[in-house]
Amino acid sequence: MSDSQPQEPFHSPRSGRREGGGHGPAHGPSQSHAQSPSRSRGHLPDPDHGHPHGQHHDQQHSHSLGHGHAAAAEATTLLLAGARLTDGRTVDVRLSGGRIQAVGTAGSLPAPALSRVDLGGYLLLPAPVEPHAHGDTALTADGEGPVSYTPDEVQRRATEAALLQLGHGATAVRSHVRIGDVHGLGPMEAVLQARRSLRGLTDLTTVAVPRLLTGVAGADGLAMLRDAVKMGASVIGGCPDLDPDPTGFLEAVLELADEHGCPVDLHTDGDDPGRLARLAAMAGGLRPGVSIGPCGGLSRLPLDVAARAADQLAAAGVRVTCLPQGDCAALERRGLRTAPVRLLRAAGVRVTAGSGALRDAGNPVGRGDPLEAAYLLASQGGLRPGEAYESISSAAREAMGLPEVRVEAGFPAELLAVRGDRIAGVLSLAYSRIVIHRGRVVARTSAVREYCDSAVAVALDLPRQGRTEPGP
């Protein structure tokens, strides 16, 4: 079968969106993602308007599409024609104003030809998101010598990492950013600048990750954490396992989060049941919520102990973000086992899956692909394909405080089209992808598979994803 090449909409408008999910115009001239952020350590708030980001092509075969105007985005209608849904229906989906306007039987929703994308042969899904990334350290595994943390370099890495993940389908990314030590708040300021430059392509949020928060050394860390929140970090994180007083670390984080109304997202191996019990007891009443991960240590505990810890986390409403693709550099490696996903889900814990390291010291071959995370949960974690996909889409969106997405009228137009007809096939061979963010196509990856001419290939009618015209 031939690989249908979807038509790119004539207009590629963009609309601004506020951090909390509202919409507003975006302003400012075009800028490259290599633009340097301010180098000062001042407490500059992250403004609610950004600059459009220029067109970017990665070195493989996916690309992000350029920007237009926010006002035009509200008026533009895009028709996704002939898409297959997970329930087996083939439908047309009309998008307008960043939302799904209508879903109807194929051919029932006319739209101008230049605003049509042919999704014949594609499965249409709510877009995945990335709940656990490290944009400040991404793409550093192949470098020679010490890793550079100049603002320019951190912004470049964070931008490229977010675009790579966007090409995979993630229309929102939560990036953990280390603060303190000799680099101070520079990495945070650089990632916030990357966030502003990417607005309209992908939603990038930041987690401030201090090293120490207790004792004499922790006083500076706590002051810097407060500064990071003032600058625009929207989530408070850290690694209580690495602090001399893990309980004191938790108390400091939860108190500051409660003061500012911020979510909490902590790194922990999860191998200390007493520490998990204390976290559950302390975090139970915090809103908008607490996430922990990667919790690989839970898999090394005796089954009854792990089950009791899972019950405590579920009762407290603490979510767990596992990293099935590998560890991240924020914690010392104590074994690469993934959190016991089935046990946690059976206890009622909301489990999400993240990518973790993207070609850095934590995983030099990390892909940052949410569909690979879901694939591993289905192939090794014992989840059904639909459950595995939920861990990177609806469950992950909920953990990140994002609105629910369904392929139904009225829901946000955050969608991923993948060549295939069922979730299992999509997780197995997710080559060609079309990514839709705020109602417009923002990235597309097209794979071409060809076989040499042979009687066997013709007789067996082997599946082909070929060019529509003869190639050179």
Image: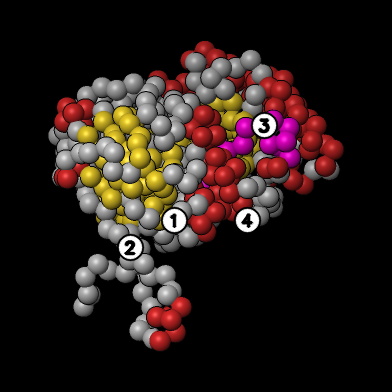
Residue 26 or 262: which is nearer the viewer? 26
* SS assignment at label 1: loop
Question: Mark 3: which amino acid?
Answer: Val
Which quadrant of the structure image shows residue 405?
Answer: top left
**Disc 2 and disc 1: Cα gap in Å?**
11 Å
Q: Which residue is mark 1?
A: 420
Instruction: In the rendered structure, find residue 399 and report the number of the disc placed on it.
Output: none
Name the quadrant containing residue 125. top left
Badge 1 density bin: few <14, some 14–19, many ≥20, Cα 10 Å: many
Residue 316 in picture, x, y percent from top left? 68, 22
Image-based side of 407 in relation to 351, left or right = left
Residue carrying label 2: 3
User: Tag on residue 349?
Assistant: 3
Magenta range is 343-358
**In what element is the residue under mark 2?**
loop
**Dot 2: few (<14), some (14–19), or many (≥20) neighbours within 10 Å?**
many
Q: Would residue 312 appear left or right of 262 to someone viewing this image?
A: right
| x and y percentages locating residue 188 in the rendered image | 40, 34
Asked whether disc 1 touches disc 4, contact meaning CB atoms under 8 Å apart, the reply is no
Instruction: Give yes or no for contact between labels 3 and 4 (Cβ–Cβ under 8 Å).
Output: no
Say which amino acid is labelled 2. Asp
Q: Which residue is mark 4?
A: 379
**Quarter of the rendering occupied by the C terminus:** bottom left
Sequence-first disc among 2 and 1: 2
